[in-house]
Image (cartoon, rainbow, N blue to C red):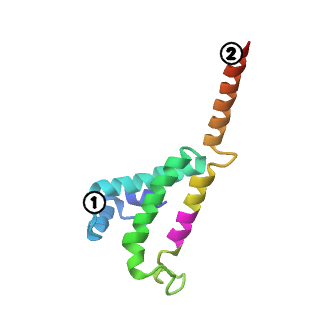
Amino acid sequence: MHGAQRLFGLLGGPGLSGTAKTLASLGLPYASALAVGLGLAEFVGGVFLILGIATLWVSLALLADMALTVWKVHYPHGLTLKGGILPGGGHTGELHLVLIGGLLCLLLGGPGAFSIDQRRSRHAEAQAQGRARMRKV
């Protein structure tokens, strides 16, 4: 959802130009290119994580995205929830830290049993075992 907001301006999002302005206001260089990169990481990365495609690389990209968000946006204001969970209530970096923890679990634990990555690795292992059997004959 956030990637669609960043890239296309859907669901009340700022779009690429608004995201680039926000990144520039945070003092980050190459704001336009960074806005495209963050939008793609969040949009494509989210779809890929749901499907279980390129789990390692997507986890790394989203970890960088979340770390940047915590460092530049939330850390200066504190990492605790202030003002409750109502809209405009002062949300800070707790959610992003939880997302970082989940991404680390995916990075270290690998994709799940129903992921495309897992299915492809099983298929590759079966093919390698078949080739090994053929060499013995």
- The count of marks equals 2
Magenta highlight range:
95-101
**Mark 1 element type:** helix
Residue furthest to the front in view is 136
Q: Label 2 belongs to which residue? A: 135
Q: Tell me how far mark 1 sits from mark 2, CA to CA.
A: 55 Å
> Would residue 73 be found to the left or right of residue 123 on screen?
left
The answer to which of marks 1 and 2 sits earlier in the sequence is 1
Q: Measured along the vertical axis of the image, is residue 49 above or below residue 68?
A: above
Amino acid type of the residue tagged 2 in the rendering? Arg
**Could you say which is closer to the camera, residue 32 or residue 126?**
126
In this rendering, which labeled residue sits more in front, label 1 or label 2?
A: 2
Residue 122 visible in the current orientation: yes
Q: Amino acid at mark 1?
A: Ala
Please name the residue that numbered disc 1 is placed on.
31
To which quarter of the image does residue 115 belong? top right
Instruction: Reply above or below: 113 against 35.
Output: above
Q: Is residue 18 left or right of residue 3?
A: left
Q: Position of residue 16 (x, y in %)?
A: 33, 58
The residue shown at (57%, 65%) is 101
Q: Residue at x 53, y 48 (%)?
A: 56
Q: In the picture, which quadrant includes the C terminus? A: top right
Q: Residues within 10 Å of mark 2 (few under 14, many from 20)?
A: few
Label 2 element class:
helix
**Residue lying at the far bottom of the rendered structure:** 83
User: Residue 119 got which mark?
Assistant: none
The reply to whether the magenta stretch includes residue 116 is no
Indicate the position of residue 24 as horizontal and vertical percent values: 26, 66
Q: Nearer the viewer, residue 9 or 113?
A: 113
